[in-house]
Image (cartoon, rainbow, N blue to C red):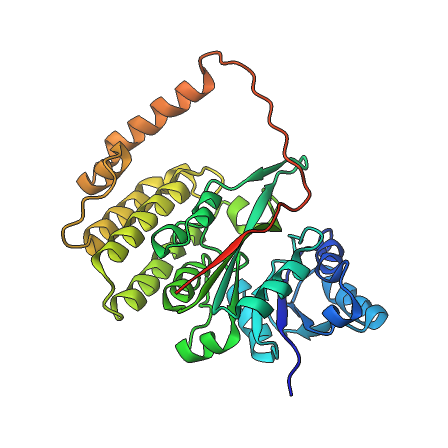
Amino acid sequence: MNSLLLSVIVPVYAVEGYLYQCLESIRAGLTAEESALVEVIAVNDASPDSCGEMLDGYAARHGDLRVLHLSSNVGLGLARNAGLAEARGKYVWFVDSDDWLPAGSVRAVLDRLRTESPDVMLIDHLRVHENGRLEPDASSGALKDFRLQSLIKLQHTAWNRIVRRGLLEELDLRFLPGWYEDVPFSNPVLIAAQRVSVLDRVCYHYRLGRLGAITATRSERHFEVFGQYDRMLEWVAARDPEPWLRHALFTLMVNHLLVVMGNDGRVHPRQRRAFFKRLAAHYRRYTPAGYAGPSGLKHRLVEARSYTLYAALRQAYRVTKRNPEPSPVVRRILASSPQQAQAATIR
């Protein structure tokens, strides 16, 4: 009988400066009995640095790490699929190898999985800046409301949701190739789940601005986000969703695409007009019937296909940001220790 409760899948590529911290954080503080419920599978995605050797050495020293070596680089999504194909746990958790788990995270996850037996468990996280500063994510407030209408607003990543492996088999759902591979995965598993558990506890530290990270790389590959949204919205449409869900996912898509387009670290200024054109086309193609979404100016400019006004608005905002009005200094201190866990299950 399979006693493994959780498979932690760690895709690895060019992260030699962060790899040991990630691996050490997964089993930190677990008892022998708890550790026996967990398997860790690291997938070396043909990393060009010493990560492959580091993984083999770690596995030889500790004996509690399974290592897969891919013969060629396939990208984050397909590397996750390779680990998933080898997973034996009832649940899978995809942890990125440049991030890490705060103390007690896996124990809290195991406890909740055993008591709730959900299809999907959602967790909270903190964003970690290069200087070590921790801050909550703007979307984390969605965890306070256990309705799907709120939970789909949580940052759509693979690492903030632990998924029953059988659910992925039932849905025949895997990660797709290309950048923004989380888009056609994260909300579909949440929408399809019959039982969702919310663990309102910081169980993940997400590193920002790492050199080489997709979100910190200027590239034409950011245009791949459009294809990922095509796949996600087609998956949802095939299940005849309620109008509110179509409207909510459409709004989330437009907001996300606006963020990608407005980030100089992702989209080169010379490519912004082309990105805007693709965004406007997606807006026209996927606008749900009866949609009355945000009245924000950027949304209206996309709807009107007015890049000239969008560019002028963006420039005005940048000038204002460079010359802000004086404001009182407010200091906020965030503890790095895990927060008190609260949870609920929705059906």
Image position of 44 with respect to 275: above or below:
below
Residue furthest bottom in the image: 1
Whether residue 217 is visible, yes or no, is no
**Left or right: 39, with 245 as reference point:** right
Q: Quadrant of residue 176?
A: bottom left
What residue lies at 43% left-to-right and 43% top-to-bottom?
267
**Left or right: 115, with 326 as reference point:** right
Q: Where does the C terminus fall, quadrant-wise?
A: bottom left
Residue furthest left in the image: 290
Q: Residue 83 appears at what percent x and percent y?
A: 60, 73
Q: Nearer the viewer, residue 2 or 305?
A: 2
Q: Nearer the viewer, residue 339 or 97?
A: 339
Q: Residue 228 appears at what percent x and percent y?
A: 37, 60
Residue furthest top in the image: 326
Image position of 71 with respect to 310: above or below:
below
Whether residue 263 is visible, yes or no, is yes
Image position of 322 with respect to 159: above or below:
above
**Left or right: 257, with 42 as reference point:** left
Q: Residue 250 appears at what percent x and percent y?
A: 28, 52
Image position of 116 with respect to 28: above or below:
below
Q: Where does the N terminus fall, quadrant-wise?
A: bottom right
What residue lies at 70% left-to-right and 73% top-to-bottom?
67
Residue furthest right in the image: 61
Q: Nearer the viewer, residue 146 or 213?
A: 146
Q: Quadrant of residue 189?
A: bottom left
What residue lies at 56% left-to-right and 20% top-to-bottom?
330
